[in-house]
């Protein structure tokens, strides 16, 4: 018998959905899940038919953080473990030249909270909960949480959420800016797909450059941001998407940024079969 894959892969209308698939453990992460998710993100980067990536969870949880049983007794330091699994995943996600939506369908705790916050767009279901749970076991938030959270809520609120391991529900998350939209549990999958398809119809090359500009601006000066914008604007202006956008504006029609899909555009890859 073959075991269930730890990441389910599906593609429809330019949207690649990667589903964490350990529902019996609320998708708590083991090495196989983390390394496979990283590999799948890299694979999506190289597929022209994939314009948007969605990361979500199977069952009633998004990701409950690290599966402690998976690392118990292992001859590996905390630093080695992070550098082998979580850190390459977060770097790959943030550096991906395509928008990544984290669709939080339930609890996102510990490193699962870090993954939830790392998306370019964060969509939550009404039953979603985010918990920076590290202090409950006397550890430091990792996998990017100390970088993402204070930029979203400020230093003091971030410290409080981390120090007290406070649970943030969906409405609080939206108010704090931890997610862009909250959808009903009953229609969450459909709402996420519809949102992702809207994003997929936008100019892919321009969004890739926009993501590069924003990532650079988060750690740079205003002068550096202005220089980077000028450089990237030239790349955007030289691309066919710009000509299409201007032409559509002039004749008052909706621009068509999605070229004709290849024969394999909506077909399952070898991983999906």
Image: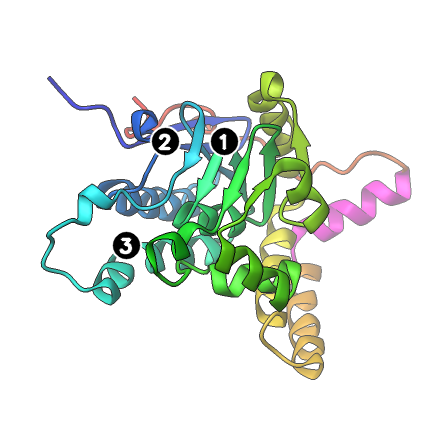
SS for tag 2? loop
Classed neighbour count for the residue bearing mark 1: other residues with Cα under 10 Å, few (<14), some (14–19), many (≥20): many
Does residue 208 lie above or below 100 as drawn?
Answer: below
SS for tag 1? loop
Sequence-wise, the earlier of marks 2 and 1 is: 2
Residue 113 at what x, y percent from top left?
A: 47, 47
Classed neighbour count for the residue bearing mark 3: other residues with Cα under 10 Å, few (<14), some (14–19), many (≥20): many
* Residue at the (62%, 31%) spot, across then down: 197
* Residue at the (25%, 66%) spot, across then down: 79
Q: Nearer the viewer, mark 3 or mark 2?
A: 2
- CB atoms of marks 2 and 1 within 8 Å: yes
SS for tag 3? loop
Which residue in the protein does label 2 denote? 26
Which of the image's four quarters has the C terminus? top left
Dominant secondary structure of the magenta stretch? helix
Which residue in the protein does label 1 denote? 106
Residue 261 at what x, y percent from top left?
A: 53, 30
Magenta residue span: 239-251
- Whether residue 221 is visible, yes or no, is yes
- Whether residue 51 is visible, yes or no, is no
């Amino acid at each position: 018998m073959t075991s269930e894959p730890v990441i389910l892969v599906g593609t429809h209308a330019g949207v690649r959905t990667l589903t964490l698939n350990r529902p019996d453990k609320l998708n708590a992460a083991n090495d196989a899940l983390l390394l496979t998710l990283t590999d799948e993100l890299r694979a999506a980067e190289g597929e022209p038919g994939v314009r948007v990536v969605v990361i979500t969870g199977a069952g009633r949880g998004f990701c409950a953080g690290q599966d402690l049983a998976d690392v118990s007794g292992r001859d590996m330091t905390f630093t080695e473990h992070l550098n082998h699994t979580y850190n390459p995943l977060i770097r790959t996600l943030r550096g991906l030249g395509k928008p990544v939506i984290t669709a939080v369908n339930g609890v996102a705790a510990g490193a699962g909270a870090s993954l939830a916050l790392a998306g370019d767009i964060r969509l939550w279901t009404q039953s979603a909960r985010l918990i920076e749970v590290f202090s409950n076991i006397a550890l430091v938030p990792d996998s990017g949480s100390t970088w993402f959270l204070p930029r979203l809520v400020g230093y003091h609120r971030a410290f409080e959420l981390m120090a007290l391991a406070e649970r943030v529900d969906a409405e609080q998350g939206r108010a704090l800016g931890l997610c862009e939209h909250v959808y009903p549990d009953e229609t969450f999958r459909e709402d996420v797909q519809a949102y992702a398809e809207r994003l997929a119809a936008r100019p892919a090359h321009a969004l890739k450059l926009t993501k590069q500009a924003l990532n650079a601006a988060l750690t740079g000066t205003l002068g550096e941001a202005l220089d980077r914008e000028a450089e990237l604007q030239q790349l955007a202006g030289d691309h066919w998407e710009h000509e299409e956008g201007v032409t559509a504006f002039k004749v008052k029609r909706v621009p068509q940024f999605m070229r004709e899909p290849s024969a394999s555009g909506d077909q399952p890859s070898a991983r999906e079969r």
